[in-house]
Image: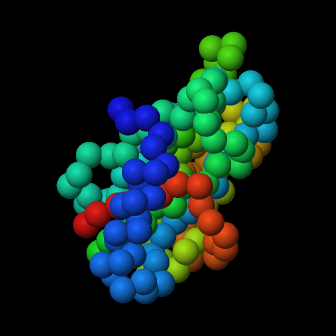
Amino acid sequence: MMKFSPFRLFSFFLAAMAISGCASPTEIVLILDMESPSQVESIRLVASGSGDSSPPLDTLLDFDAAGAPEFPASIAFVLEGEASTLTVDASATLRDGSTIERRVVTDFQLDRSIALPVYLLDICVDVECPDGQTCGDLGTCTSASISGGSLPEFSGDPQDFALINR
């Protein structure tokens, strides 16, 4: 498991942009937010692309550590290669030991930077869902898939970057 390292990931992003000639990036910007941010101890993010032969990105965001990210946190997943899907599992451990888990699966949109909101809601504390589903806005299990074409454009500067290679 890797610790959150914004400077290292940012340097990878800059290198990728230099190699690509600064074309419009194909990226998904994860916007991670919580209903009760003061209750979170840590969040584990595991992200992978379909067909990606490299190990998944496995990052622990420790909210008790110095320099911890603030909500909403944003991480850009930049695709190198053909458009594919991105799967992100977010698991928040709260100060009372309970957990909130959310899974999202979406597809990259070629030459677009899209915003993927992931809200960790109190209503989802300790809710377990079957494969392919996640705890939704009503606290019930719903499909984890979201069409990338339905997501809005992202504008702004993400706090961190990761590359999804093909």
Residue placed farthest to the left in the image? 53
Check the image and report above or below for 38 versus 6.
above
Q: Quadrant of the C terminus?
A: bottom left
Question: Which residue is rendered at x = 63% and y = 24% of the image?
Answer: 64
Q: In which quarter of the image is the N terminus?
A: top left
On screen, residue 110 versus residue 1, left or right, reads right
Figure quadrant of residue 58: top left
Figure quadrant of residue 16: bottom left
Question: Which residue is rendered at x = 64% and y = 18% of the image?
Answer: 98
Residue placed farthest to the top in the image? 96
Q: How is the image coloured?
A: rainbow
- Give the camera-side residue of 164 and 62: 62
Where in the figure is residue 147, as x and y percent of width and height?
55, 69
Where in the figure is residue 88, as x and y percent of width and height?
48, 49
Where in the figure is residue 131, as x and y percent of width and height?
45, 41
Check the image and report above or below for 110 versus 57.
below
- Give the camera-side residue of 5 and 108: 5
Check the image and report above or below for 14 versus 72.
below
Figure quadrant of residue 151: bottom right
Question: Which residue is rendered at x = 59% and y = 61% of the image?
Answer: 158
Where in the figure is residue 81, as x and y percent of width and height?
29, 75
- Give the camera-side residue of 70 and 30: 70
Residue 11 shows up from this direction: yes
